[in-house]
Image: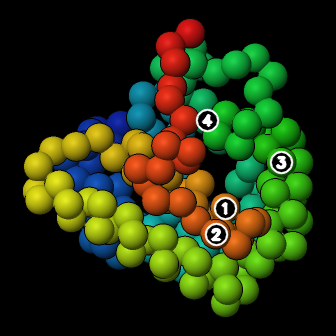
Amino acid sequence: SLRPLPLTAAQLFMHRPLTDPLLSKQYGPVFTVWMGPQKVVVLAGYKTVKEALVNHAEVFGDRHVLPITKDMMVKDSYGVLWSNGEKWRELRRFALTNLRDFGMGKRVCEEKIIEEAQCLCQVFNDFRGKAFDTTEPVNCAVSNIISSLVYGSRFEYNDPDFIVPIHPI
């Protein structure tokens, strides 16, 4: 059962992560805090998160949409990032069914991800501790994983055929 914590207790957690091991030791791996009027369920620990997102994914399909992201959402959006509820569940089923055909969950998929993660780490290391925007390299890495699974090959991050310039609307 979920045990809600009062707002004053929730305020204490603003200075430390809600997944702090001391909190899960005291309240268990699943507990509730109230952030103002918003109820927040905290899942602490790998096993708990896996149980929720893998074994009970259908139940955890509805997520709270933050007011700041509502302005950025496209009405009736079908993207994985912005969808919610039944629309999200439908997309998830479709994606999982199709990704399994391309090797998701198999050793070959894991090898492609590890290979791309090594390339991404090298890109990060090339910045030698200086600040940089991770958006483009991470997008390239994700695209390369998909490309290597679907087409059997990857692109270099600076390949002009691979990089699509983003034009303002």
Q: Amino acid under label 4?
A: His
Numbered disc in front, either 3 or 4: 3
Q: Earlier in the sequence, mark 3 or mark 4?
A: 4
Q: Secondary structure at mark 1?
A: helix
Separation of marks 4 and 1 at Cα, in angstroms:
32 Å
Which of pointers 3 and 1 lies earlier in the amino acid sequence?
Answer: 3
Q: Earlier in the sequence, mark 2 or mark 3?
A: 3
**Residue 1: quadrant of the picture:** bottom right
Q: Which residue is mark 2?
A: 153
Q: Is residue 104 visible?
A: yes
Q: Nearer the viewer, residue 75 or 29?
A: 75
Callout 3 amino acid: Leu
Q: Residue furthest left?
A: 129
**Callout 2–callout 1 Cβ contact below 8 Å:** yes
* Disc 2 from disc 1: Cα separation: 6 Å
The answer to whether the residue labelled 2 contacts the one labelled 3, judged by CB atoms less than 8 Å apart, is no
How would you rate the neighbour count of disc 2 (Cα within 10 Å): few for under 14, some for 14-19, many for 20 or more? few
| Mark 4 in CB contact with mark 1 (< 8 angstroms) | no
User: Who is closer to the viewer here, 143 or 63?
Assistant: 143
Question: Where in the figure is residue 34, as x and y percent of width and height?
Answer: 45, 39
Residue 95 lies left or right of residue 121; in this view the side is: right
| Residue on which the image places disc 1 | 147
Mark 2 vs mark 1: give the one in front: 2
Residue position for label 4: 64
Other residues around mark 1 within 10 Å, as few (<14) / some (14–19) / many (≥20)? some
